[in-house]
């Protein structure tokens, strides 16, 4: 049987916005609807033209607007619909006041980086790295069973991707993910190629733009 290939993609660059988000349900909805910037649209189109993303059998995306906007170019080039699963959504930050307390005096100033170190931390209405890793793993376990031997594109978010990759990656002293001595750069956008034999990961590589 052929190996299953999953292209795990972080959405492209988003528009910079001012204002408080994630402090209540309405602001969480605003976060979910965040759109790509003009450059992000260009990045998404360029990404979709990579040879690696030809002949994709199925496309999955989180329900967030920026992820679907990134996926639409891949979908168009492959003449495939976009399938949506909320398990691919970004981890919920929750209450920003509580998050701010957690981030006091932290070296990286990036909550997703700090949650790589403290995987059980979460605000009262947010998600921990471990919560996010579990739901992401649940999604991938399912598609690996359903689409054996297929080429699958999956568009998700920085935090969620980082936490999912903890299944195989180590965190170095600079709070970066490392796979087989190679540092992974989970920026917007990024493209990771994951090769599975049955449900076992046999290779993970970052495809540079």
Image (cartoon, helix red, strand yellow):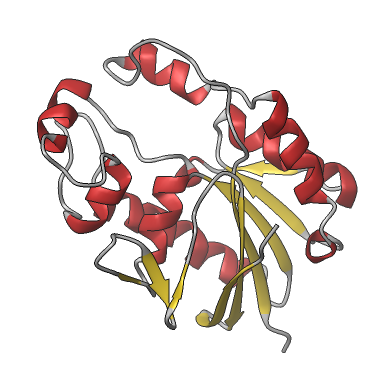
Closer to the camera, 111 or 148?
Answer: 111
Write down the quadrant of residue 3 in the picture.
bottom right
Q: Which of the image's four quarters has the C terminus? A: bottom right
Residue 205 % position (x, y): 58, 73
Closer to the camera, 131 or 95?
Answer: 95
Residue 4 % position (x, y): 66, 76
Closer to the camera, 101 or 166?
Answer: 101
Residue 81 % position (x, y): 79, 43
Residue 193 position (above or below residue 157)? below
Q: Residue at x 80, y 41 (%)?
A: 45
Q: Is residue 63 left or right of residue 97?
A: right
Write down the quadrant of residue 124 in the picture.
top left
Write down the quadrant of residue 23 in the picture.
top left
Residue 206 position (above or below residue 97)? below
Q: Is residue 149 left or right of residue 194?
A: right
Q: Is residue 170 left or right of residue 199?
A: left
Label count reads 0
Residue 154 % position (x, y): 62, 53
Q: Which of the image's four quarters has the N terminus? A: bottom right
Q: Residue at x 18, y 40 (%)?
A: 122
Closer to the camera, 71 or 115?
Answer: 115
Q: Residue at x 26, y 39 (%)?
A: 109
Residue 62 position (above or below residue 7)? above
Q: Residue at x 79, y 66 (%)?
A: 52
């Amino acid at each position: 049987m052929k190996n299953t290939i999953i292209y795990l993609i972080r959405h492209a660059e988003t528009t910079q916005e001012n204002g408080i988000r994630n402090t209540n349900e309405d602001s969480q909805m605003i976060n979910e609807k965040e759109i790509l910037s003009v450059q992000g649209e260009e990045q998404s189109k360029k990404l979709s033209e990579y040879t690696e993303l030809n002949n994709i059998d199925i496309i999955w995306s989180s329900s967030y607007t920026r992820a679907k906007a990134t996926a639409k170019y891949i979908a168009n080039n492959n003449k495939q619909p976009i399938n949506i699963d909320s398990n691919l959504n970004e981890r919920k930050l929750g209450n920003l006041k509580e998050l701010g307390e957690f981030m006091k005096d932290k070296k990286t100033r990036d909550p997703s980086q700090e949650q790589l170190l403290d995987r059980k931390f979460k605000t009262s209405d947010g998600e921990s790295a471990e919560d996010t890793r579990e739901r992401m793993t649940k999604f991938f376990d399912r598609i690996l069973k359903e689409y054996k031997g297929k080429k699958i594109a999956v568009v998700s978010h920085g935090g969620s991707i980082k936490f999912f990759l903890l299944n195989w990656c180590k965190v170095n002293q600079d709070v970066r993910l490392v796979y087989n001595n190679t540092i992974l750069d989970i920026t917007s956008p990024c493209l990771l190629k994951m090769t599975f034999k049955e449900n076992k990961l046999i290779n993970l590589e970052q495809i540079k733009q």
